Image (cartoon, coloured by chain):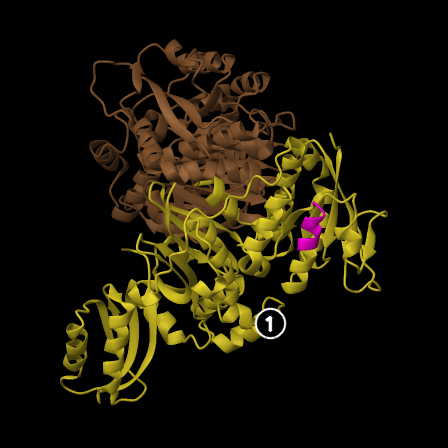
Chain colours: A brown, B yellow
C-alpha cells in the first residue's frame, strides 16, 4: 500500500499558502487519520521569478501545467488558482492522466461541474469541492451525507461574506452603502471590482451548486434569478427593523413539487430567524428538510485558513479513498430532470416602501388596488417625510404571486397620490 | 453484488416508527443514492401482544433478540431501543455474528463506545451513531470529516432540548423553573423523571462523545464535571440580560495543550454569541478550530423524524460501505492519551450575585477580598432588594482560576456585610 501520496498544487495565492501551512502543522494528525503522508511535489505559478516560501526544499515550481498534469508520480491535484476556461482545460487533462481533484473553485464547479464529474467517473477519479461553497463550513458534506436520507425542501444561504459585512455595518453603524464599500475595499475585504459580490453573482454560483446537490437536479447558473444590493438604502434597513425584520442578501432555493426556484436577492428575515443573527463576514446555510425540519450551518465563508481547512479535509477524504481503493465512487448523478419554476409563479410576502401625497383618500386608493388583486397586509407603517406634503408608507403583504404583485405595483405607479415606489423586497421566514 | 440489504430493528418506539416511515417515504431516493433496497426483516419488541403498524406484511416481530442477532440473512442492526447493559450484550452478540450497527443510543456510546468499536474492528463491522448527539444535526460527521484537517480547540454545545426549552420559557415568559418543568411534562416534552435532563447527565453523555471525537482522546463520562439547572432563579436570568448575557445550559469542552476540561453547567453567554439565540427545544454545537475559527451547527436535537433522519443517513453510509467492500474502516482509534485538566486549574470569567447589607464601606470590604486574589471586574450592578436594609449586588469578573475564586467566595461568606451568596455562574464567550 502506498505510504506517501504526492500532490500537485495549482496556485500559490492566499489559499494555496494556507494549504501548505495546514499540511505542515497537522502532519501527524493527518498521518494518524489516513495512515499516510502527503507531500507537495510541484506547484504551478504564473510568475517563476517571485520569491516564495515553499513547503519543502524538494518542492519544484513550474509555470507549465503539463509538468504537473502529466507527472506520473502525482496522485492528486489541488486547484486553488481560480479561473474558468483555462483551469477547466488543465483539470480535464489531469483527469485524463488519472489524477484525483480537490478544488475550491466555485465558478468552475457552478459552470462546468457536470463535465468534470463525467470525466472523473470515466477515469475512476475523485472530485471534491467542499471549499467552493461557504469556505470553512462543511455544508456540502452535510447535504450529501448527514442529510442523505431526507428530502430537502428549502435552502437559504448567506453565502457572500463581503455583502454580509457591508449590510451588517449599514445596519449597526448607520453608514451608507458607498462609504462602507469603500472602507471594505481599503481593508482588503472587498475586491477593487466588487461586481461579482455586490451584484449577487458570487452568491448565485454557490446557490447553483447547493441546488444541484440539495435537490438532485442539474441546474445551471442561468437558472438563478439574481438581484444585488447596490443602492440598498438605510431607510429600508431602519424600517425593516421597526417591522421586526432584518435585510440580508440571501440565496433562496425552494422545491415545492411543482418545481424549483432559485434566487439571490436582498430579502427581509424575521429578527429571530437563525440567519438574521449571522453578522459581519460570516456565512450560514439554513436547510429545511421534510424529516429533519430546520437546521443551520454557520461559520467563516472565506479566508486563508478556513478555506484551506475545507481543501485539506477534502484531500483527507481522497487519501482514504485511495487507500481503500474506492476512488471515483462518491459522485451520484442527479436523480431528477431539472424542473425550474419561474419566480413569477412563486408566492412570497412582499415589503414595499412608497412616497405618497398627504391627502384624504390616499390610503383608500392604494388599498383598493391591492384589494383588486386579493393582496392583504400583515403590517403597515406611515411616517412623515422630508417633504411636508408627502408621507412615507411601508407595507408588508401576506403571500402573493410575483405576477399579481407586479401588476398591482404598476397600477400604483399610475396613481396621482403616489410620488414614487422606493423599494420592493421579498419577505422570508416565519410562515 | 447484493441488491437488497436486510435490517433487523431493535425497538419500535417513537424513533423506530420514524425509521420505518423514512425508509418507506424515501425508498427511491435511497435506492438512487446507494444502488440497493432496504428491507426490515424483523423487529425486536418487549411486548408481542401490542398491535402495531409494521413496514411490510412480511416483517416479523420477536421478543427474542437471538432471532435477530443470529439470523444469517440480516446485514445491519438498527438499535433504537435504548438501555445500556442488556443492549450492550445484544449488540456485542450481533457484532460477533458479523452484523453492522447503527445506533441512536448516547448512553451506550458514552459508556461502552470503545468496547463496541474494538469488537467491530475485529469483525470488520461498521458502527455509526450520528443520532446519539444532537439528533438531526450531523455534528459527528462534521467533526470527523468536514473538520478533519483542523485541530479543534473548543466545543460548546446546547445538547439537551428539554433544559433549553425550560430556560427559554423562563427567559421569555418570566415563569419559574418548577411551573415550566410541570408544563413541559404535561406536554410530554420532559420525562416524568426529569433527572437525566435537568441535572445535566444527558448533556454530559453527549459531551463525552463529542470530546472523544473532537480531541481524539479516550474520555469517560466520569471526566465531565456536571452541574444542572435545578433551582435556577429568574433573578439571575434577568440580571444576566441586563449585563448583556443569556444563561444557557452548556457543555463546554476545551483543549489548551496543558489538558482538556469538559463540563456541563449553566453559564452566561454574550447575547450576540451564536449560541445565545438557540431557543426552545433546539440544539446547537459551536466548534472552534485553530484553522477554521468559529463554526456552529444548529438544528433539532430530538424528535421522531429528526432523529430517524440521522439513523437512516447512517444506514445509507453502511449500505455504501457494504457495496464498496469497505465496512469496518471508518473508525480511527484515539490519537492521544487522555489528558484531563481539573476544572480548578481552568481560568474563566465569573458571575456572582450577592445579598449585602446597605452600609458604608460594604463595597470596599468586598472589593478588598477580590483584590487580594488579583480578581478584577468587568461589570458591577447594585440594585435595591425586597428588604430595605439590603442591596443586591451582581458582579462579572475578568478571568480567574476556579481555585482563587472559591477562596475569595469563602472569605466573602465570612463578612458581616454579606447576607448570602445567591449564585455563581461561569461566563463564556466574547474573549
Q: Is residue A92 visible?
A: yes
Q: Is residue A151 visible?
A: no
Callout 1 crowding tier (Cα within 10 Å): few <14, some 14–19, many ≥20: some
Which sits in the foreground, A260 or B259? Answer: B259
- Drawn side of residue A53 relative to residue B81, left or right: left
Residue B351 in the image: state x and y as whole percent. 30, 70
Magenta segment range? B92-98
Which subunit holds the residue at mark 1? B
- The residue to which callout 1 is attached is B185
Vertical side of B186 occupied by A306: above or below? above
Residue A77 in the image: state x and y as whole percent. 42, 21
Q: Quadrant of the N terminus of chain B?
A: top right
- Drawn side of residue A372 relative to residue B72, left or right: left
- Drawn side of residue A180 relative to residue A4, left or right: left
Residue A334 in the image: state x and y as whole percent. 62, 27
Is-magenta flag for residue A56?
no
**Main SS of the magenta segment?**
helix
At mark 1, the secondary structure is helix
Q: Which residue does the image show at 39% across and 31% down from the upper left?
A: A228
Residue A45 in the image: state x and y as whole percent. 30, 16
Number of labels in the image equals: 1
Which sits in the foreground, A412 or A379? Answer: A379
Which sits in the foreground, A10 or B353? Answer: A10
Q: Which residue does the image show at 32% across and 71% down from the upper left?
A: B239
Amino acid at each position: 500500500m502506498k505510504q506517501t501520496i504526492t500532490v500537485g498544487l495549482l496556485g500559490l495565492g492566499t489559499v494555496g499558502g494556507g494549504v501548505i501551512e495546514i499540511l505542515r502543522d497537522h502532519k501527524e494528525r493527518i498521518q494518524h487519520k489516513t495512515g499516510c503522508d502527503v507531500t507537495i511535489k510541484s506547484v504551478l505559478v504564473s510568475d517563476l521569478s517571485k520569491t516564495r516560501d515553499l513547503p519543502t526544499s524538494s518542492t519544484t515550481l513550474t509555470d507549465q501545467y503539463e509538468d504537473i498534469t502529466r507527472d506520473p508520480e502525482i496522485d492528486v491535484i489541488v486547484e486553488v488558482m481560480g479561473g474558468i476556461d483555462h483551469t477547466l482545460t488543465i483539470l480535464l487533462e489531469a483527469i485524463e492522466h488519472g489524477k484525483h481533484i480537490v478544488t475550491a473553485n466555485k465558478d468552475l464547479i457552478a459552470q462546468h461541474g457536470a463535465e468534470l464529474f463525467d470525466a472523473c467517473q470515466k477515469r475512476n477519479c475523485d472530485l471534491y469541492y467542499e471549499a467552493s461553497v461557504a469556505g470553512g463550513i462543511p455544508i456540502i458534506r452535510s447535504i450529501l451525507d448527514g442529510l442523505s436520507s431526507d428530502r430537502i425542501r428549502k435552502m437559504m444561504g448567506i453565502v457572500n461574506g463581503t455583502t454580509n459585512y457591508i449590510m451588517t455595518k449599514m445596519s449597526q453603524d448607520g453608514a451608507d452603502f458607498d462609504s462602507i464599500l469603500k472602507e471594505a475595499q481599503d481593508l482588503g475585504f472587498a475586491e477593487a471590482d466588487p461586481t461579482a459580490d455586490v451584484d449577487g453573482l458570487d452568491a448565485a454560483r454557490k446557490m447553483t451548486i447547493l441546488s444541484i446537490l440539495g435537490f438532485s437536479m442539474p441546474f445551471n447558473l442561468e437558472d438563478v434569478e439574481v438581484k444585488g444590493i447596490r443602492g440598498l438604502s438605510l431607510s429600508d434597513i431602519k424600517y425593516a427593523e421597526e417591522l421586526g425584520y432584518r435585510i440580508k442578501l440571501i440565496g433562496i432555493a425552494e422545491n415545492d413539487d411543482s418545481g424549483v426556484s432559485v434566487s439571490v436577492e436582498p430579502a427581509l428575515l424575521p429578527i429571530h430567524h437563525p440567519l438574521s443573527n449571522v453578522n459581519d463576514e460570516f456565512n450560514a446555510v439554513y436547510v429545511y428538510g421534510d424529516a429533519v425540519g430546520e437546521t443551520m450551518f454557520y461559520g467563516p465563508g472565506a479566508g486563508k485558513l478556513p478555506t484551506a481547512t475545507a481543501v485539506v479535509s477534502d484531500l483527507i477524504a481522497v487519501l482514504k479513498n485511495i487507500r481503500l481503493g474506492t476512488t471515483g465512487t462518491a459522485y451520484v448523478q442527479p436523480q431528477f430532470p431539472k424542473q425550474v419554476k419561474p419566480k413569477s409563479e412563486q408566492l412570497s410576502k412582499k415589503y414595499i416602501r412608497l412616497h405618497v401625497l398627504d391627502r384624504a383618500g390616499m390610503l383608500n386608493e392604494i388599498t383598493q388596488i391591492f384589494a383588486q388583486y386579493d393582496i392583504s397586509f400583515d403590517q403597515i407603517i406611515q411616517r412623515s417625510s422630508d417633504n411636508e406634503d408627502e408621507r412615507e408608507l411601508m407595507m408588508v403583504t401576506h403571500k402573493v404571486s410575483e405576477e399579481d404583485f407586479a401588476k398591482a405595483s404598476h397600477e400604483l405607479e399610475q396613481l396621482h397620490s403616489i410620488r414614487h415606489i422606493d423599494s420592493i423586497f421579498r419577505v422570508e421566514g416565519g410562515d
